[in-house]
Image (tube, rainbow, N blue to C red):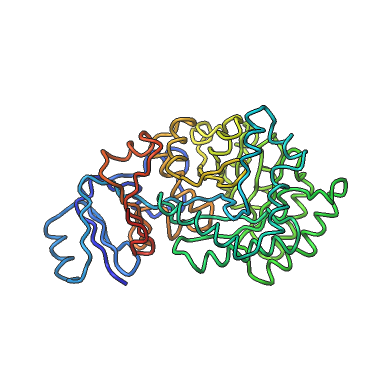
Amino acid sequence: MSSILIENIRELAGIDYQTRILLSGKEMTDFETLHNAYVYIKEGKIEAFGKMDRDVIYKIRQQNPDVLIMDASGRLVFPAFCDAHTHLVYPASREIEYIDKIKGLSYEEIARRGGGILNSAARMQMASEDELFSSASVRIEEIMSMGTGAVEIKSGYGLTTDSELKMLRVIKRLKENHPVRIKATFLGAHAVPQQYKGRQSEYVDLIINEMIPMVVAEDLADYIDVFCDKGFFTVEDTDRILNAGMKYGLRPKIHANELARSGGIQVGVKYNALSVDHLEFTEDEEIEVLRGSETMPVVLPGAAFFLNMPYAPARKMIDEGLPLAMASDFNPGSSPSGNMQLILSMASILYRLTPEEGLAATTINGAYAMGLSEELGSIAVGKTANLCVTRPIPGLAYLPYYYGTNKVDKLILDGEICVEH
């Protein structure tokens, strides 16, 4: 494994000298930066970083004659994005429904007509593992090219035992064949299949009695998720599923409060969920429930933007002292983009986060929402060297400001250059 010395960095962003696992409230503004800096990477880890110093650089070069020297003059270096919520394994796009949205149909109306998640589920049952792996690999390469170094991927477009297992096997195969860090989440409770309409509790029984044991037997998932929301799964359904999952060692991650105040945040905190995600309909009661918990609120700007929904009170959450992560929700129906640079821009434009807060939300706090923040998400000695090197730009604020273009020039994962434009 080669060592890399990145020199003359215009701005090194996302520094955490305390090696914290998340940043809350005002701490998110204090995500530090350093000008005229260097980073030394050895055996896949961040060995050292600091201000450019002739004596320090000379010593590193002398002790490591084979070190790869990278000149980052005029460039920003920051932790690779950690995208904590995606559905990027799917069989086909859904642009026809996009036209329906333009004509005024709501997300719920499309779902009631058999569209949305059920549309993808029908196609999923016909797709082969090889087809799914091939198309998802293209998406993985795409998000890596824009700076994503860790990504959570959910099942949930299967809705039968065989199809859910198929999806999760594809995610496992992606883990084995791509350098990006991947976490898998079992989301059998993403929607109620057509054949179980009016018999929702029987589908919940299927998830509990058949799907979860088989998922765990094949070691296919890191986490379990439920779409606890209006028109989908109730708090009671969610309680049953999470209780069963935890008996098998699967920690929860919850879809909550996207369409209404569903009680999903409360049940997520009750079961010590790693994250509760979406959160468009969040008020003081939910903020108070989250306060002091170990559950990360995750906002998904792409979905709210694409669906013309209310925006989650992200600014208020941070001002109230909560941590906050932002993720892409990359999926074919409600957020067909995995571009975390765009999410960073939306953090500032739509939710009024500062560039430092936005970076914390898309790196260290995203890593926490995947159980990876002890290794990833910040510039700290001993952490895995997952870093982005931009093309020449003025500094951190330029990342969210200059939206719509790819500003990442190189992606380093586990201390190796994986993307180079």
Q: Position of residue 292 (x, y in %)?
A: 57, 45
Residue under the image location 67 percent in, 27 percent down? 104
Compared with 59, 235 (above or below) is above
Residue under the image location 45 percent in, 30 percent down? 349
Name which quarter of the figure residue 107 lies in: top right
Residue under the image location 16 percent in, 66 percent down? 61
Counting the numbered discs, the total is 0
Q: Position of residue 75 (x, y in %)?
A: 25, 46
State left or right for residue 255 relative to residue 410: right
Q: Position of residue 95 (x, y in %)?
A: 61, 40
State left or right for residue 215 relative to residue 143: right
Q: Position of residue 328 (x, y in %)?
A: 52, 45
Compared with 302, 82 (above or below) is below
Q: Quadrant of the N terminus?
A: bottom left
Considering every residue shown, the one lying at the far right of the view is 198
Residue under the image location 56 percent in, 50 percent down? 86
Q: Nearer the viewer, residue 151 or 379?
A: 151
Q: Nearer the viewer, residue 69 or 224?
A: 69
State left or right for residue 3 relative to residue 320: left
Name which quarter of the figure residue 44 lies in: bottom left
Considering every residue shown, the one lying at the far top of the view is 104
State left or right for residue 362 relative to residue 230: left
